[in-house]
Amino acid sequence: MMMIIQRRTRIWIALVAAILAMGASSGAMAHTTVLPLIGTIGSCVYCQQVERAIAGAQQSVDILLSNAELDEQALWDTITAASGRGIDVRVLLDESDWAQSITDKNRPTIDYLNEHGIPARFDDPSVTTHAKLVVIDRRIVILGSTNWNEHSFYDQVQADLSIDDPIVGEVFSCYFDRLWDGSLFPGAVKLATDSVTPDQEMIIPLP
């Protein structure tokens, strides 16, 4: 299991690095912001960045998580407030077919969000979602190691990134769309990226 997780981690790192490198070669990096979010015990830098980003959302917020509990109320208040002002919010959480405790912890969050009119549901139980991903306006991507519970926020050392870039954002938005629609399959996301390849389409493979 550890070898599989490490391999997946290497794939994601290579994917992000390749995308950023392509942006840099075309001059697009002038409009790219990469912010490391290094969490320490007792301080949730990640929470602060996620709250700021969601509060500034103009169109959409997509959230994909392995575990999300109702521990950090300010974070959930920001999400419900975004939905209340017309932002399209979607939340997809793991439903485990091997660890009932994961499903039990995520269920109250789905119920809470649905009660607030926010589309939230479980993934396919045959698939293990280990991602911690937030995509805002299809351009701001926040991802890394932090699950959404008090222990992850305040009792563990975490490492995350916030990336503001339309190309990176579109890749992860397409990834989320496929998971949400149940249509994720081996292949690639084809993106029109004129800023990178003026007369062509670029294909960025998904794992």
Image (spheres, grey):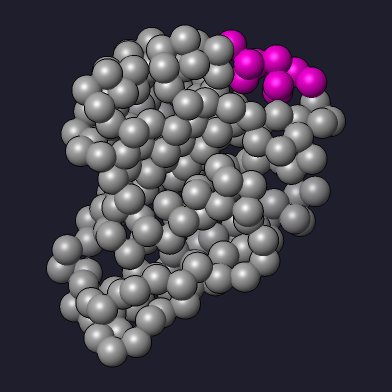
Say above or below: 67 vs 174: above
In the visual, does 19 lie left or right of 127? Answer: left
Is residue 38 among what the camera can see? no
Q: Is residue 9 left or right of residue 52?
A: right
* Residue 188 image offset from top left, x and y in percent: 56, 70
Which is more toward the observer, 37 or 104? 104
Residue 99 percent location from the top left of the image: 80, 26
Q: Splitting the image into 4 quarters, where does residue 53 fall?
A: top left
Q: Position of residue 56 (x, y in %)?
A: 19, 34
Residue 103 is covered by the magenta coloring = yes
Query: In this rendering, is residue 78 above or below 4?
Result: above
All told, the count of numbered labels is: 0
Q: Which residues are magenta?
A: 100-108
Main SS of the magenta segment?
helix
Q: Residue at x 42, y 38 (%)?
A: 62
**In which image quadrant can residue 117 be found?**
top left
Residue 176 covered by magenta stretch: no
Q: Is residue 179 above or below residue 189?
A: above
Quarter placement of the C terminus = bottom right
Residue at the image point whose x is 47% and y is 77% from the top:
203
Give left or right: position of 113 versus 206.
Answer: left
